[in-house]
Image (spheres, rainbow, N blue to C red):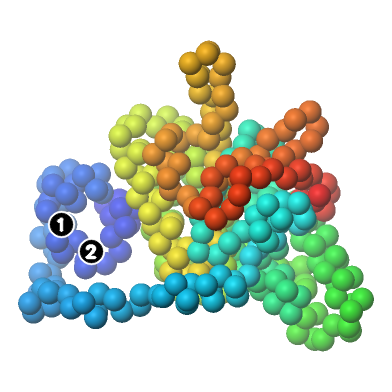
Amino acid sequence: LRAKLFAAGHFTTTTLLFLTPLELAREAQLSNEEALSVLKLVPRSSSSSSSDGIISASSALDGAKTAWDLLEYEKNRKKIVTSCAELDMILEGGFCPKEVTEICGVPGVGKTQLGMQLAINVQIPVKLGGVGGHAIYIDTEGSFMLERALQMTKASIDELVLASSLSSPMDDDLIQQLDIDTYLSHIYLVRVHDPTEQLAVINNLPNLLKEHNQVKLIVIDSITFNFRQDFEDMAGRTRLLAEMGQKLAKIAEEHDLAIVLTNQVTMKPSNNEISRIVPALGESWSHACTNRVMMYWIDTQRYAHVVKSPSLQAATAAYDIDECGICS
Ligand code: ADP
């Protein structure tokens, strides 16, 4: 019961205050009796509604930002680089905080490699022009390989050490930051096995972020796996995905961090009977992310194409993967 309440986002009694038993039963997939017994335990006196229930205009505008504030923020925000110059160029510098970006593509094209590379690159120290943050990596497919992460981390650190020692001697602080153990201990790996666990972990992210307030990147690799395998209730799936999308967008915004989701692809027949490769999870899910990047192959060359974005131009970059990770 507890797991189901957590999965539906109810960590305290406050969020249950205004629900009817039927609403709670539907939301948390409980029987009506179970929902009723849960709601009976909620202390009604803990209601925090204001005495007249009216929100004044000034309080409604508290926290509102002007266009000028936003412009200043845009100018100063640091992005997470990909290690491929051409890809960084079409992303105007890399993956953005406050945005949810989806990477789609066929198996083997490099989605996990890019996710791991970002979890490493988010840690590039501020002194070296990086974000200097930590990463949460939610692995739903069991594809995060520690040995590969180690190989990529070592390559990335070697490159940074070389570049920084060319310009000036490294101080103790920088030496401490450019350490393989430090890097690996700043990737918080969470393995999930089914849709309920996935939802529970996403609902619990705000608590995790309180503990780890230096997190600047969350990777979910993949968002799709648990929602494609044997998922029979398609209407329920659409509702759960929409809720998940909204929660992730809110977390990205409120915690000023980048969220990167990987998505699988599927074949969609079109009118002239030639099937097209499209991102999985359907039309309604396509609205859940800020940006969508499609990765694909032509012969042996890999490409990434910005398919959808409110601020980036539709553009294509060639990228590669070698023993060091993502590269040009
Ligand atoms: P996806 O997540 O899209 O299914 P991956 O991110 O797992 O795909 O990418 C797998 C590909 O990454 C492999 O096909 C291989 O080409 C490349 N790759 C993985 N490890 C290495 C390595 N050590 N050296 C070079 N290429 C690698």
Amino acid at dot 2: Thr
Examine the rendered structure and indicate whether residue 155 appears above or below residue 139. Answer: below
Examine the rendered structure and indicate whether residue 279 appears above or below residue 181. Answer: above
Q: Tell me which residue sits at (55%, 65%) in the image.
A: 97
How busy is the neighbourhood of tag 2: few (under 14 within 10 Å), some, or many (20 plus)? few
Quadrant in which residue 143 is drawn: top right
Q: Secondary structure at mark 1?
A: loop
Proximity of marks 1 and 2: CB atoms separated by less than 8 Å: yes
How busy is the neighbourhood of tag 1: few (under 14 within 10 Å), some, or many (20 plus)? few
Label 1 CB sits under 8 Å from any ligand 1 atom: no
Which residue position holds label 2? 15
Which residue position holds label 1? 19
Looking at the picture, tell me which residue is in the foreground, 16 or 49: 49
Q: Tell me which residue sits at (58%, 62%) in the image.
A: 96
Query: Which numbered circle lies on residue 261?
Result: none
Q: Is residue 238 left or right of residue 155?
A: left
Distance between the alpha carbons at the discs numbered 1 and 2: 8 Å
Q: Tell me which residue sits at (44%, 72%) in the image.
A: 67
Q: Is residue 164 visible?
A: yes
Amino acid at dot 1: Leu
Q: Position of residue 215 (x, y in %)?
A: 56, 69
Q: Residue furthest right?
A: 166
Q: Residue furthest top?
A: 273
Q: Position of residue 157 (x, y in %)?
A: 81, 67
Quadrant in which residue 239 is drawn: top left
Q: Secondary structure at mark 2?
A: helix
Q: Tell me which residue sits at (49%, 40%) in the image.
A: 224
Q: Is residue 186 visible?
A: no
Looking at the picture, tell me which residue is in the foreground, 297 or 194: 297
Q: Position of residue 142 (x, y in %)?
A: 60, 44
Looking at the picture, tell me which residue is in the foreground, 23 or 275: 275
Q: Is residue 233 left or right of residue 262?
A: left
